[in-house]
Image (cartoon, grey):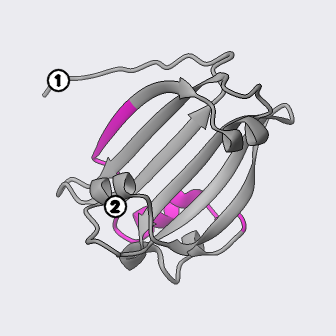
Amino acid sequence: MGTQKIREVGEMIPPAEVSAVLGLPDGASAVVRRRTILLDGRPVEQADSWYPAAIAAGTALARPGKIKGGAVTLLADLGYTVHEVREEIEVRAATAEDSTELVLPDGAPVIVLRRTSLTAEAVPFEASVMVMAPQGRRLRYRLIAG
């Protein structure tokens, strides 16, 4: 059974790569929700979701705890629905934090999935960085042209 543990929620300056994909000006803050995803009680993924502060500040996204209906519903209620998703996949060695949080040996391989969600008007409103233990993972994609 899958569940999640919220590690941190707050407003801060995001890493440069997150600021870039969200189109934030230098020094602009964003709201982050850091979670650890558990499968049968075992940590399998760290998921950090970033939202521009102009969208998320003052909402349930910026507060610790579960969001009634989930983040997707809350964002839709705010007028932000996914029209396009951009993803990037990388395999790298686990950092010390990855190893600790995912209970992996130092330097074990991890899968990093970076996802940016955009509206139909090409406005980016969520950037997620997911670090996954590779065991048991299958990434499946379906692309439809036009």
User: Does 13 sit left or right of 104 as displayed?
Assistant: left
Query: Is the Cβ of the residue at disc 1 closer than 8 Å to that at disc 2?
Result: no
Residue 14, picture quadrant: bottom left
Tag 2's secondary structure?
helix
Tag 1's secondary structure?
loop
Residue 51 seen in the figure:
yes
Q: Residue at x 61, y 19 (%)?
A: 137
Residue 42, picture quadrant: top right
Q: Residue at x 39, y 20 (%)?
A: 141
Nearer to the camera, 97 or 66: 97
The three-letter code of the residue at mark 2 reads: Ser
Which mark, by number, is residue 19?
2
Residue found at the far left of this picture: 146
Residue found at the far right of this picture: 41
Which mark, by number, is residue 117?
none
User: Residue 138 at x, y = what percent?
Assistant: 56, 16
Q: Residue at x 42, y 28 (%)?
A: 89
Task: Report if residue 72 lies within the magenta region.
Answer: yes
Residue count near mark 2 (Cα–Cα under 10 Å), binned few <14, some 14–19, many ≥20 = many
The three-letter code of the residue at mark 1 reads: Ala
Q: Which residue range is magenta in the image? A: 65-88
Q: Which residue is mark 1?
A: 145
Residue found at the far bottom of this picture: 58
Please, is residue 27 above or below residue 131 in the view? below
Quarter holding the N terminus is: top right
User: Does 109 sit left or right of 106 as displayed?
Assistant: left
